Image: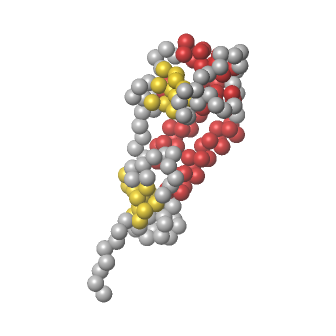
Amino acid sequence: MVVMSTSSSKLPKLIKQLKHDYPTFSFQIGVSERWSPRSATITFNPVQSTRALAYGVLHELAHALLQHHTYKTDFELVKLEAKAWQLAAEIGKKYGFKISGDHIQNCLDTYRDWLHGRSNCPRCGLQGLQKNSYSYKCPNCQNVWFVTSGHLARPYRRRQATKKHPA
């Protein structure tokens, strides 16, 4: 079990203040920063730099405040992430944490790179269009491929089996 120090550093003060200011949400130690709409819990891992952890907690708080529960498309996820970072930067000012535009763009780049990897046609290389949560279709070669469901997962692409026609 990880025990959080009660020293005078900014982070324990931040968590304590967030618990006070946002009593409808729970804040608990876990493996990484995460918002769980089901339990209204923001999870955080205190074993990292104060600044990085504060940014992550503020970002997850923003998801909570924006009532981000689910998304239907990969592009929608990227939009939700951008909105959460924008609000996190605003909230951060109130608590003495300035989240730079460069930091936000670097974080969003990870999602844009992930989206690019998922949507890139494995047959011809053109960007495909998402059909549903698990598949894309190429407008150029009509190839269909399947992707993993998680946004933290490596963007594996599996081609759809094609029917062989007799020659």
Q: Residue furthest top?
A: 20
| Colour scheme of the rendered structure | secondary structure
Screen quadrant of the N terminus: top right
Would you say 105 lies left or right of 30 here? right
Residue at the image point whose x is 42% and y is 40% from the top: 71
Residue at the image point whose x is 61% and y is 22% from the top: 4
Task: Return the x and y of residue 123 as percentages of the image width and height.
Answer: 48, 70
In this rendering, the answer to whether 28 lies above or below 21 is below
Q: Residue furthest bottom?
A: 167
Residue at the image point whose x is 43% and y is 56% from the top: 147
In this rendering, the answer to whether 159 lies above or below 38 is below
Would you say 60 lies left or right of 14 here? left
Q: Residue furthest front?
A: 1
| The one of 20 and 106 positioned closer to us in this rendering | 20
Q: Quadrant of residue 142?
A: bottom left
Kindly tell me whether residue 55 is visible in this rendering: no
| The one of 94 and 154 positioned closer to us in this rendering | 154
Screen quadrant of the C terminus: bottom left
Residue at the image point whose x is 54% and y is 51% from the top: 114
In this rendering, the answer to whether 38 lies above or below 150 is above
Task: Return the x and y of residue 19 as percentages of the image width and height.
Answer: 54, 16
How many numbered circles does the render carry? 0
Task: Return the x and y of residue 87 as percentages of the image width and height.
Answer: 58, 28
